């Protein structure tokens, strides 16, 4: 199998997940900033046009970052980042969904509609008037999460999981594009610092990140 890879927080999410599991994923690079993922050759593989995707040896293409990570976990269960039993897996999936609905999707869309609008205006429907409201909604989600994770090191419990990687890759990206990490959310800030210190955090950054000046 091979990762259809590019710069960006979502491809980084899969790369970071694989590093935490000790998996090597051969990669085929695509020019996200140049819109290669919105051109016909890529759309034939992934009609959603998002990066990344995972192409299996038989030609099957799996898209959507969380789905790709779940597939990798099934292929190599340990170390577990989703869970080792039904209760652990359900708990992780619950927290992934909470993180996505309350925080990351709002942060990503706020970027697409504001600081990133010149990248996205011809790729998707953009709603610039919604950007400020989405930033406020994301902030409310981070405040909510800050209270919930008091007294523990990771989002879903006492060990790193997919939920942590989903949130970290979003927050590390967004901090450079109009949504900084707040010092007045001490639990979330301490969590971010712990995640940022992990070898997989630096190891998953794309080679183009310094040039683009965004963490993806």
Image: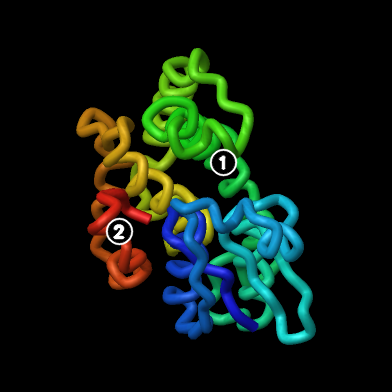
Whole-Å distance between the Cαs marked 1 and 2? 23 Å
Residue 91 visible from this viewpoint: no
Give the labeled residue for mark 2: 209
Circles 1 and 2: CB atoms closer than 8 Å? no
- Which mark is first along the chain, 2 or 1? 1
From the viewer's perspective, is residue 14 above or below residue 118? below
From the viewer's perspective, is residue 36 above or below residue 137? below
The x, y position of residue 107, in whole percent, is 46, 34
Give the labeled residue for mark 1: 100
The x, y position of residue 210, in whole percent, is 23, 58
* Image quarter in which the N terminus is found: bottom right
* Image quarter in which the C terminus is found: bottom left
From the viewer's perspective, is residue 147 above or below residue 20? above
Around disc 2, counting alpha carbons within 10 Å, would you say few (fewer than 14), some (14 to 19), or many (20 or more)? Answer: some
Q: Which SS class for mark 2?
A: helix
Residue at (41, 32) in percent of width and height: 142
Of circles 1 and 2, the one toward us is: 2
Q: Is 53 placed left or right of 151 in the picture? A: right
């Amino acid at each position: 199998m091979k990762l259809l890879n590019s710069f960006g927080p979502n491809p980084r999410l899969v790369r970071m997940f694989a590093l935490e599991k000790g998996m090597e994923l051969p990669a085929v690079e695509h020019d996200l900033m140049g819109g290669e993922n919105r051109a016909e050759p890529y759309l034939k593989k992934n009609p959603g046009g998002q990066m990344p995707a995972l192409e299996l040896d038989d030609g099957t293409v799996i898209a959507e970052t969380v789905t790709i990570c779940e597939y990798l976990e099934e292929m190599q269960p340990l170390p577990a980042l989703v869970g080792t039993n039904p209760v652990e897996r359900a708990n992780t999936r619950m927290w992934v969904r909470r993180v996505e609905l309350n925080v990351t999707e709002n942060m990503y869309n706020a970027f697409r509609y504001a600081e990133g609008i010149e990248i996205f205006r011809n790729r998707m429907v953009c709603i610039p008037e919604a950007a400020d409201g989405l930033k406020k909604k994301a902030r409310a989600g981070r405040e909510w999460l800050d209270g919930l994770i008091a007294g523990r090191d990771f989002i879903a419990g006492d060990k790193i999981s997919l939920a942590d990687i989903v949130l970290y890759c979003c927050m590390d990206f967004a901090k450079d594009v109009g949504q900084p990490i707040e010092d007045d959310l001490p639990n979330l800030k301490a969590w971010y610092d712990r995640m940022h210190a992990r070898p997989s955090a630096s190891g998953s950054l794309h080679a183009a990140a310094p040039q683009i000046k965004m963490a993806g």
